[in-house]
Amino acid sequence: AQSVTQLGSHVSVSEGALVLLRCNYSSSVPPYLFWYVQYPNQGLQLLLKYTTGATLVKGINGFEAEFKKSETSFHLTKPSAHMSDAAEYFCAVSDLGGADGLTFGKGTHLIIQP
Amino acid sequence: NAGVTQTPKFQVLKTGQSMTLQCAQDMNHNSMYWYRQDPGMGLRLIYYSASEGTTDKGEVPNGYNVSRLNKREFSLRLESAAPSQTSVYFCASVYREGEQFFGPGTRLTVL
């Protein structure tokens, strides 16, 4: 069975500061890894994904994440936070090519301080 | 191209009432999913349909039934609603390599 752990239910950073949201996973097979963002009262939007190939993946809105197999991690970063980044972020994992759905972490609420 | 649509957006039920949540996608995707989102719990998979005519249980299927009506539509039914089913329900379909497109959600309250 696969699982996802997101460290920190709430993360607060100042506008312009580095954003780092942590995600660790367990999976019995090489996983597909995802980060989704959810703005208030909306559905989930894909930020980025890792399937195969380059371990550093770039997504929308200036976010990127690095797949580290040895650490079973897929942390999300952004060099400079913007007020519009305030949202809930979910890390998710899938094996079997995603056919049986995603397993989500519990989410991290990102707060941007002016 | 509307993507994934869900109806209704909001619903209030009394304990014991039944209802069906509707989901449709216009992207010609084979696989569709139902999740529930609860505070501090992330999203949990209720049921999924890998292709038209097939359905499988996810992590939290108890109290729910599903129907894959055709390739476009995948409905979720609560036969006898309970307060524990108060949640936000999301439908999704798979594009490729596990990438899922989500609908806007249905906010359900069971009194």
Image: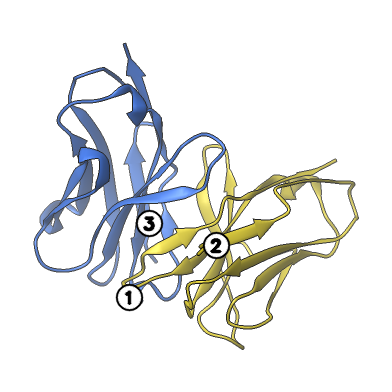
Chain colours: A blue, B yellow
For the residues labelled 3 and 2, the Cα–Cα distance comes to: 26 Å
Q: Nearer the viewer, mark 2 or mark 1?
A: 2
Callout 1: 10 Å neighbours few (<14), some, many (20+)?
some
Q: Mark 2 near mark 1, Cβ–Cβ under 8 Å?
A: no
User: Quarter of the image containing the N terminus of chain A?
Assistant: bottom left
Q: Nearer the viewer, residue B28 or A91?
A: B28
Q: Amino acid at mark 1?
A: Gly
- Check the residue under mark 1 and report the chain it is in: A
Q: Secondary structure at mark 1?
A: helix
Callout 3: 10 Å neighbours few (<14), some, many (20+)?
some
For the residues labelled 2 and 1, the Cα–Cα distance comes to: 21 Å
**Residue B107: percent from left, percent from top:** 69, 45
> In this picture, is B72 found above or below A67?
below
Q: Secondary structure at mark 3?
A: strand
Q: Are marks 1 and 3 on the same chain?
A: yes
The answer to which image quadrant residue B60 occupies is bottom right
Q: Which residue is mark 2?
A: B4
Kindly identify the residue that appears in the image at 23 percent across and 41 percent down.
A76
Q: Amino acid at mark 2?
A: Val
Q: Which residue is mark 3?
A: A3
Q: What's the mark number on residue A97?
A: 1
Res. A11 visible in picture? no
Q: Would residue B69 be found to the left or right of residue A75 on screen?
A: right
- Check the residue under mark 2 and report the chain it is in: B
Callout 2: 10 Å neighbours few (<14), some, many (20+)?
many
**Residue A59: percent from left, percent from top:** 23, 49
Q: Nearer the viewer, residue A43 or B60?
A: A43
The answer to which image quadrant residue A106 occupies is top left
Q: Mark 3 near mark 2, Cβ–Cβ under 8 Å?
A: no
Q: Are marks 3 and 2 on the same chain?
A: no
Kindly identify the residue that appears in the image at 48 percent across and 80 percent down.
B30
Q: Secondary structure at mark 2?
A: strand
